[in-house]
Amino acid sequence: MTSKVTPGNRRVFICGSALRGQPDHQNLQGAQFVRTAATQPRYRLHVAGEDWHPAIYETESSGISIPGEVYEMTQEQFDYLAANEPPNMYPVEVHLDNDETATAFLYPKALIDEYNLPDISNTYGGWAAYKARTATV
């Protein structure tokens, strides 16, 4: 069952440093929290930017479900978020666990391969769990 989005707004899937409790949450500029969510198991999760942000890409095999949060954003909030994303991130529609789609920021697979970014897809259970676990190590 899908809920309606206010005209002119969009749904955005957050799964990294802008999650609640993470250092870049203020980049959402007060966007309305809709629900916790997860992607369909079509993605991989890597560590980029010297442990600063996740690098996610869609894959045809060996994908996992990535946990996160869905927010409803105005165009102004989305533009602010996009302007504050790390280099090389790009917006694209991702497939969520309830068959909805939402915009998320992914990272080019070619750069993940080029820089041999660590794959944490099957290790921590998402970005927030990774950050919590590595903060205490």
Image (cartoon, rainbow, N blue to C red):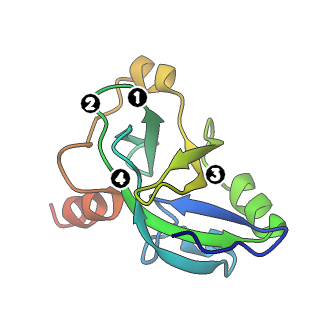
Q: Secondary structure at mark 4?
A: loop
Earlier-in-chain disc, 3 versus 2? 2
Q: What residue does disc 4 label?
A: 66
Residue at the extreme front: 1
Mark 3 and mark 2: Cα distance apart in space:
26 Å
Q: Kindly identify the amino acid type of the residue bearing the numbered disc 4.
A: Ile
Pointers 3 and 2 in contact (C-beta within 8 Å):
no
**Please, is residue 81 above or below residue 47 in the view?**
below
Q: Kindly identify the amino acid type of the residue bearing the numbered disc 3.
A: Glu
Q: What residue does disc 3 label?
A: 85
Mark 4 and mark 1: Cα distance apart in space:
13 Å
Mark 4 and mark 3: Cα distance apart in space:
19 Å
Q: Kindly identify the amino acid type of the residue bearing the numbered disc 1.
A: Thr
Q: Position of residue 16 (x, y in %)?
A: 45, 58
**Please, is residue 3 above or below residue 114 in the view?**
below
Pointers 1 and 2 in contact (C-beta within 8 Å):
yes
